[in-house]
Structure formats: C-alpha cells, structure tokens
Image (cartoon, rainbow, N blue to C red):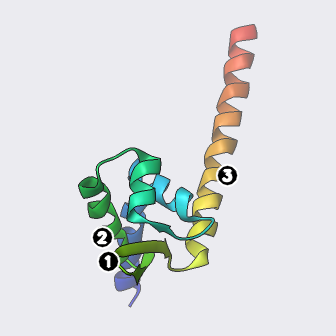
Amino acid sequence: MDKRIFEMHAGICTIFSNPKRLEIIDLLRDGEKSVNELSSLMEIPQANLSQHLSLMRQRGILETRRDGVNIYYSIANPKVIKAFEIMREVLLEQLSMHEKMFKKIKSA
C-alpha cells in the first residue's frame, strides 16, 4: 500500500513540476474558468492548454462542468490550493534567505 501511495504522490507532484500547470492552479484558486478564459489569461494556444488541463483532470487535480458549448474547469479539492500555497511560502522563504546571504557577502 505504501508503494502505491508513493507512486500516486509522485504522479501528483509531476503536475506541480510544470510552470504552466502551476499558473492554471493559480488562476483557478478564486473559482472556475472556461477554457477560453484560461487561454486568454495565459496567452497560450488552446490546444496546448487543453493538454495540460486533460492531464490535470486525469490526475484528479481539476474537475469540469459543461454549460452549452463551454467547458469550465475548477480545482477538484481545496487542499490542492493549500499545497500550492505552502510550496509558494517555502520558495519565498528560501528566496528571502538567499537575498540576506547575498547582501551579507556583498557587504563583507
């Protein structure tokens, strides 16, 4: 069972390893958006976006809702946003530490 969980964990982490997919999560944290809205906001072709959205949906990160011809995407589980925010906090803390070290070295 542990090995299966590790495999699933690694699969989810691959979603977080792509900047475009992280941008999608960031854009969807405040609520659902259509494919057209996401494509426009991200300034990428819809075909490229659809590949990312499909993978994220397969991994259970996103869910969809159809309204006529429009498909809307949203975050499937709010804990995904928590994980996203925690990783962002870790990165900002690391950047802050690196800046402090750089300033100390520069002033020495």
Estimate how packed mark 1 is, as few (under 14), some (14 to 19) or many (20 or more) residues with alpha carbons within 10 Å. Answer: few
SS class of the residue under badge 3? helix
Q: Nearer the viewer, residue 56 or 32?
A: 32
Residue 54, numbered label: 2
Say left or right for 42 vs 107: left
Estimate how packed mark 3 is, as few (under 14), some (14 to 19) or many (20 or more) residues with alpha carbons within 10 Å. Answer: few
Amino acid type of the residue tagged 3 in the rendering: Glu
State the residue lying farthest toward the front. Answer: 68
SS class of the residue under badge 1? helix
Report whether residue 25 is seen.
Answer: yes
Whole-angstrom CA distance, mark 1 to mark 3, is 27 Å
Quadrant where the N terminus is found in the figure: bottom left
Q: Nearer the viewer, mark 2 or mark 3?
A: 2
Give the quadrant of residue 12. bottom left
At 34% from the left edge and 84% from the top edge, which residue is drawn? 4
SS class of the residue under badge 2? helix
Residue 58, numbered label: 1
- First in sequence: mark 2 or mark 3? 2
Instruction: Give residue 25's position: percent from left, percent from top.
Output: 51, 61
At 54% from the left edge and 58% from the top edge, which residue is drawn? 27
- 11 shown above or below 67: above
- First in sequence: mark 1 or mark 3? 1
Q: Nearer the viewer, mark 1 or mark 3?
A: 1
Q: Nearer the viewer, residue 90 or 36?
A: 36
Report whether residue 108 is seen.
Answer: no
Residue ID for mark 3: 89
Say left or right for 38 vs 48: right
Amino acid type of the residue tagged 2 in the rendering: Ser
At 47% from the left edge and 49% from the top edge, which residue is drawn? 41
